[in-house]
Amino acid sequence: ELLEGSEISVFGISDGVDVLALPVARDYKRAYDGDDGPNTGGMGSYAPVGGIDADGLAGLVELTIAPVVAELRRRGTPFVGTVFAGLMLTESGPRVLEYNCRFGDPETQSLMALVDGDLRAVLAAAAAGDLGGVSLSIAEGAAVTVVLAAGDYPARGDVGTPIHGIDRAEKLGAHVFHAGTSMRDGAVVTNGGRVLNVTATGASLVDARLRAYEAAAAIAWEGMRYRRDIAEGAEASASG
């Protein structure tokens, strides 16, 4: 069956009974701008996704995550941890594409940048089976993550090429997450396909996007590339 629509990622933390929802995120799986090229592990993300209010998020969780948690509890194998549902929003309604028992990458980088509360306390409550009544404060605004990749990714990665500008990106206020890197003679070098993730926050999605790309442009290594259209037009689409 061919499904058409936009994809979103819905996350929930479960203690085996209750589910605490996190903001909805969107990632970009294709290698090149315009959603062209082969699938990858993810070339960027943003959160939250516009047009989904608190009631809409609760409805998505009740539709996709809560039934799975309830069924596993009924079977005597309660699930404790993170459930990630990948959905496509079609004209006939949300359709589930995949379930994962983990956080998503690179969606989580954008999500964690917005967490304003104590995530450890939430995870501890889930592990103790006592998530009922627990909440997690989420900051206002938005976050955008841009993945910096090797030039030939996803066909092949890059190993041993010196990376420059990480400090400059961090001084601009971005979070730089290491993925495919290693240390050589005291310097950071490439060691994989998706090498770095640059995450920035802002009062709006437009602001966060500008900050993320400004920081991404401060980093360089021979052969580095990244998509230039992460979150492009997303805020206008949401408001429209």
Image: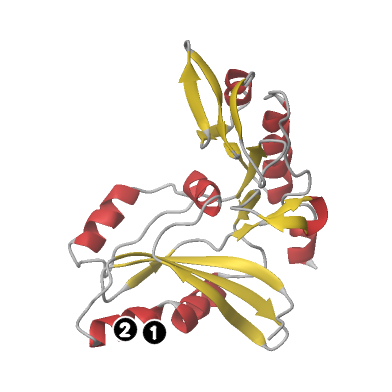
Q: CA distance from mark 1 to mark 2?
A: 5 Å
* Location of residue 233 (image quadrant): bottom right
Percent x, y for residue 209? 71, 43
Observer-nearest of 6 and 210: 6
The front one of 75 and 56 is 75
Q: Position of residue 196 (x, y in %)?
A: 58, 35
Dot 1 amino acid type: Pro
Residue 231 versus residue 79 in the image, above or below: above
Q: Is residue 178 above or below residue 115?
A: above
Q: Which residue is mark 2?
A: 70
Secondary element type, mark 1: helix
Residue ranking furthest to the front: 156
Cβ atoms under marks 1 and 2 closer than 8 Å = yes
* Residue at the image point whose x is 59% and y is 32% from the top: 174
Kindly identify the amino acid type of the residue bearing the numbered disc 2: Ala
Q: Quadrant of residue 124?
A: bottom left
Q: Which mark is residue 161?
A: none
* Residue appearing at x 48%, y 83% in the figure: 63
Crowd tier of the residue under label 1, counting other residues whose Cα lies within 10 Å: few below 14, some 14–19, many 20 or above: few
Mark count: 2
Residue lying at 51% horizontally and 52% vertically, measured from the top left: 111
Q: Is residue 197 visible?
A: no
Element at label 2:
helix
Q: Which residue is mark 1?
A: 67
Mark 2 nearby-residue class (10 Å; few <14, some 14–19, many ≥20): some
Q: Quadrant of the C terminus?
A: bottom right
Residue 214 location (% of width, % of height)? 72, 31
Q: Determine which quarter of the picture holds residue 15.
A: bottom left
